[in-house]
Amino acid sequence: MCLGIPGQIVEIVDVQKKLAKVDVSGVRRQVNIACIVNEEHAVESCVGDWVLVHVGFAMSRIDAEEARKTLELLHELGEAQKEIESMTRPVG
């Protein structure tokens, strides 16, 4: 199953390349945030945002309550652990 997992942007790694560090249940991983930035929401203003992460990309911005509920449900289903483990594997 392909799914996005909620994570919170904790750091901007590279403004030009639109790379950020996202915390997903204590696991931090670099992701591309190009899909969520625009003229009204610049790269630098993304720290603290909750996003849905899928295969190294922040696909959309979500609110904190939606993130909490989604993580809770995923943990109940056992899917969160699988996604978190996949994020700890080396890329490439």
Image (cartoon, rainbow, N blue to C red):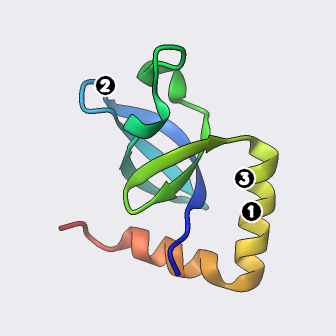
Q: Look at label 2 and name its amino acid.
A: Val
- Mark 2 vs mark 3, CA separation in Å: 24 Å
Q: CA distance from mark 2 to mark 1?
A: 28 Å
Most foreground residue, 72 or 52: 52
Which mark, by number, is residue 15? Answer: 2
| Residues packed near mark 1 inside 10 Å, few (<14), some (14 to 19) or many (20 plus) | some
Q: Is residue 45 left or right of residue 89?
A: right
> In the figure, residue 25 lies in which quadrant?
bottom right
Q: Secondary structure at mark 3?
A: helix
Q: Name the quadrant containing residue 8.
A: top right
Q: Position of residue 7 (x, y in %)?
A: 58, 52
**Element marked by disc 2:** loop
Q: Is residue 34 above or below residue 76?
A: above
Residue 6 numbered mark, or none: none
Check contact, mark 1 vs mark 3: CB within 8 A. Answer: yes
- x, y percent for residue 17: 25, 32
Q: Earlier in the sequence, mark 2 or mark 1?
A: 2
Toward the left, the furthest residue is: 92
The residue tagged 3 is 67
Question: Where's residue 56, x and y in %?
Answer: 37, 56
Residue that badge 1 annotates: 70
